[in-house]
Image: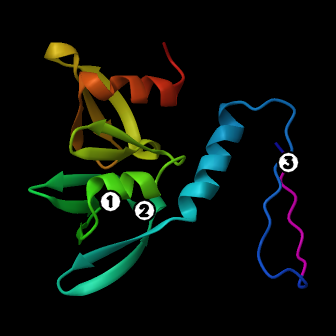
Amino acid sequence: MKIILKEDKSLTESIIDITYNIFDQRIKRVVELVKTNGVQLKGEKEGSIHLMPSSDIYYIESVDNVSFLYSELDVFESREKLYSLNNQLKNTSFIQINKSTILNMDYLKDVSPLSNYRLEGQLDNGEKIIISRHYMKNVKQYLEIQ
């Protein structure tokens, strides 16, 4: 894969042009990375509001109608509902994995089977999350497995 960078001071916004011979998993990941980096979410911590690139978020969890954004080391509270965050992150590397959790698949390290047709996912930071059987089709579709 070759990368060509060209500076053009006359542009008012950046343009990303991807040319490929086969739309494979590598190209798909590049497109998702670009889309994910364009989305910023508001998170609150200790009274301060933080604008966070979605690429820094490992997963989003809703507990008692409050959404929490989990980064590698921190947790931020969001006033957005889970369904609203899910809509904002559509067509990115985020997918819903259970009733209350949206996962950034870029940080999924591995999965192990559990009882009741569920999976336990381990993230790059060592955290473990549950993928319910109802949402397993999302994971399989994203990973392009049957």
Residue 103 drawn at (x, y percent): 35, 45
Residue 45 drawn at (x, y percent): 21, 78
In the rendered view, tell whether residue 19 sits above or below residue 78.
above
Q: Which mark, residue 54?
A: none
**Front of the two marks 2 and 3:** 2
Residue at 60%, 56% in the rendered image: 35
Residue at 66%, 39% in the rendered image: 28
Type of amino acid under label 2 = Asp
Residue at 60%, 48% in the rendered image: 32
Quarter of image, res 72: bottom left
**Front of the two marks 1 and 2:** 2
Residue 7 drawn at (x, y percent): 88, 76
Contact (Cβ within 8 Å) of mark 1 with mark 2: yes
> If you read the primary sequence from the N terminus, does the residue marked by circle 2 or circle 3 appear first?
3
Q: Secondary structure at mark 2?
A: helix
Residue 18 drawn at (x, y percent): 81, 49
Q: Secondary structure at mark 3?
A: loop
Type of amino acid under label 3 = Lys
In the rendered view, tell whether residue 38 sits above or below residue 118.
below
Prevalent SS, magenta region:
loop
In the rendered view, tell whether residue 132 sits above or below residue 10.
above
Give the residue at mark 2. 56
Quarter of image, res 1: top right
Give the residue at mark 3. 2
Give the residue at mark 1. 72
